[in-house]
Amino acid sequence: MNATKPVAVIHFDKHEFRAPRIAVTAALDGVACYFVNAPAASKLDELGAIVETFRYLWRRECGGMILYVGHPVIRELLDDLSSHYPGLEIRSLVTGEKMRRTWDACRRAHTRNVGVKEKPRVERTEHRVAATDASKKKTDNTVGIAVVSSDGSVKMSNVDARTVLDGEFAAIRLAVRQAVESKTVRSIEILTDSLTAATAINTRGHAVNQGAGRHEASCCSELRNATALGIDVRVIWVRGHAGHPLNELAHRAAMASRRCRQWGQSSEQFRRSLTAELREVLAAAGETVQTSGLSSDRYCA
């Protein structure tokens, strides 16, 4: 992080007091400096309150700053208007000692100003095993992806990709995103039957290879995000169609997702059926799948 630039954080939340309102707090270099509690009858009102907070910060530090703001629309807007704010750097993650200190100051001030008790943080303790897969038909770019997890969930989705390999990266990214959003996962083992994807991630780390597909680049970004949050992620190759129950279910889920998309049908019935199968597998396996208790010949060293 650029040590010479001021570091700013904008924190906000919505609440009800007779009518919908939005509370926004800003902090600069470890010190809270701005607070507003405004009516928020619409999304436009919410965005307006956050934008006004940014304008206040910019009036104070118009020579540039490093800004964290949690609202994706505001981040995108400021990125689009970057030429109007020379020296502004937008962050989507709180990283580095200076920014963490500023974030903590902003959050504490926000809690005091709004007058609510701070929610206790949920400690990440869960270990999860997730199998991923992708399915692509040669004649178009629709790729079905799936994540089957030891928490009993089956996630099915579709992406647009030129190769099935890029779809495999999209599936791995989905598994990592689920771990991040869970708020409880401390470590995750992601099983993929794509030796190329597993090797790329394990040899290059989270660096993006030149010429990588967009889903590979997005996967590496999500891995960096998980690492920054302290989540231990291991991507492991497991031989496809070798009898691993999570891998087999992930294969069927990805294929069903793609076919339903191409046939214009809902995949929900398939997801429910596969979820029921998964929970039977987990019940029969006990702790074996939970701790990835698989024979070593199914892994790539």
Image (tube, rainbow, N blue to C red):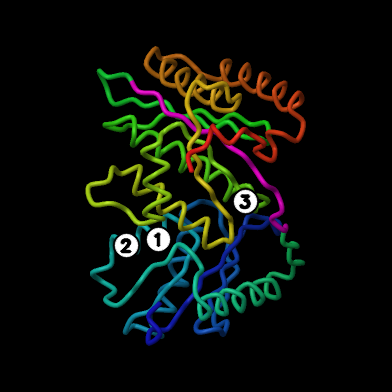
User: Which residue is depicted at the point 52% across and 51% down?
Assistant: 42
Is 24 placed above or below 218 here? below
* Local crowd size for mark 3, using a 10 Å CA cut-off: few (<14), some (14–19), many (≥20): some
User: How far is the residue under mark 1 from the one under mark 2?
Assistant: 6 Å
Q: Are marks 1 and 3 in contact (CB under 8 Å)?
A: no
Q: Amino acid at mark 1?
A: Arg
User: Which residue is depicted at the point 69% across and 71% down?
Assistant: 111
Lower sequence index among marks 1 and 3: 1
Q: Give yes or no for residue 129 being in the magenta stretch.
A: yes
Q: Which residue is mark 2?
A: 79
User: How far is the residue under mark 1 from the one under mark 3?
Assistant: 29 Å
Q: Amino acid at mark 2?
A: Asp
Q: Which residue is mark 1?
A: 75
Is 63 placed above or below 288 here? below
In which image quadrant can residue 134 be found? top left
Residue 73: percent from the left, percent from the top?
Answer: 42, 55
Q: Which quadrant, please, contains the N terminus?
A: bottom left
User: Which residue is depicted at the point 30% across and 77% down?
Assistant: 87
Q: Amino acid at mark 3?
A: Ser
Q: Which mark is residue 187?
A: 3
Secondary structure of the residue carrying numbered label 1? helix
Q: Main secondary structure of the magenta part?
A: strand
Q: Are marks 1 and 2 in contact (CB under 8 Å)?
A: yes
Question: Which of these two is toward me, 78 or 35?
Answer: 78
In the image, the segment drawn in magenta is 122-136
Secondary structure of the residue carrying numbered label 2? helix
Residue 242: percent from the left, percent from the top?
Answer: 52, 22
User: Which residue is depicted at the point 57% across and 50% down?
Assistant: 180
Residue 15: percent from the left, percent from the top?
Answer: 66, 58
Secondary structure of the residue carrying numbered label 3? strand
Residue 273: percent from the left, percent from the top?
Answer: 63, 16
